[in-house]
Amino acid sequence: MSTATATATAAPRTRPARRPSRVRRWWPHAATLAVLLLVWSVVAASDVVSPSYLTPSPREVWDAFVRANTNHPIGGGVDRVVRGEEGYFLWEHLLVSLQRIGAGLAAAIVVGIPLGLFMGTVDWAGTLLGPYVDFLRSIPPLAYIGFLVAWFGIYDASKIWLLFLASFPPIALATVNGVRGVREDQLHAIRTLGATRRQTVTTVLLPATLPDILSGVRVAVGFAWTTVVAAELVNGIPGIGGLAYLSGTQNKIALSVACIIVIGLTAIALDALIRTIEKALVPWRGKD
């Protein structure tokens, strides 16, 4: 028997790793959710919080969600049907908020990425403008509401500006960090080949910076969603944040909780969408 044959015989066969089934991957999440709903139901049924309407049960939250998405008769024996909540279905409130967030985020991308490229490639621009972008990043969005409403009124312009101010800093700073992480030898090589500044940006800087830009967009989307309630505090109907705030002031706690859950689930869905886009555009990220 040859040495190669003996080695092949002695070497144990390795089985390919099996991917966990969907059931095995999802049952821990389902079990955790079941325990959470059980604890929630027990707390709502007990007298831990008084009065009892401050702790709606999962069933009451579900009923409020269904009511907000259907037509229902008004109380008091009046033969009139009310459409959803505040004249809109819940999904319509959500759609309006998504449109506002989309407008603010789009403006932040249009301004933040070019500014980040400028700050990252021009030393004096980064030194001069960097502290101001950091200053904007450190200010809570609620601090802007008063003068934004005074400047732009109570309609969508002030809300979009607020969402822009919440989304712009993380995108700009992520772009700057991405540019500064590009290897100098890559830039020297393409310049040696006679590339112009525009060609250097489009063929080297942007592709190399794209993973950081997408990370900044993910952070910006999170900031925008945490700001949506603040953006819709004034004249926020229709709007999911405005409905959450208004229902809370009217002691419709079940509806307010339903709005909060919808906001959270939508944020998770948007984050998953951005991660999917990131995998498609930068499949090499995380690989050696």
Image (spheres, rainbow, N blue to C red):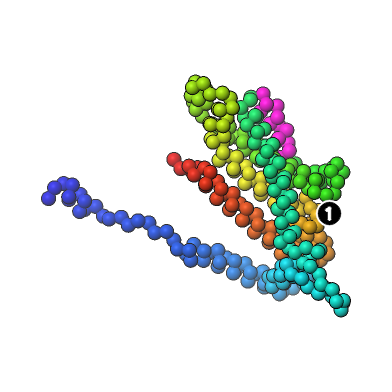
Residue 166's place in the image compared with 38, above or below, is: above
- What percent of the width, then of the height, locates residue 196? 56, 23
Does residue 248 show up?
A: no
Q: Does the magenta stretch include residue 126?
A: yes
Q: Is residue 20 left or right of residue 206?
A: left
Where residue 113 sits: x, y (%)?
A: 64, 36
Main secondary-structure element of the magenta-colored stretch? helix
For the magenta stretch, what is the residue range? Answer: 124-137
User: Within 10 angstroms of label 1, few (less than 14), some, or many (20 or more) residues?
Assistant: some
Residue lying at 75% horizontally and 67% vertically, measured from the top left = 68
Q: Is residue 215 above or below residue 181?
A: below
User: Could you tell whether 61 is left or right of 186 in the image?
Assistant: right
Q: Which residue lies furthest to the bottom in this view?
A: 77
Q: Where is residue 171 in the image (x, y as percent from the top left)?
A: 65, 40
At mark 1, the secondary structure is loop
Residue at image point 18% right, 47% down: 4
Q: What amino acid type is highlighted by mark number 1?
A: Asn
Residue under numbered circle 1: 235
- Residue 280 versus residue 251 in the image, above or below: above
Q: Quadrant of the C terminus?
A: top left
In the rendered image, which quarter is residue 201 located in? top right
Front in this rendered view, residue 211 or 139: 211
Q: Does the magenta stretch include residue 207?
A: no
Residue 183: image x %, image y %?
A: 51, 29
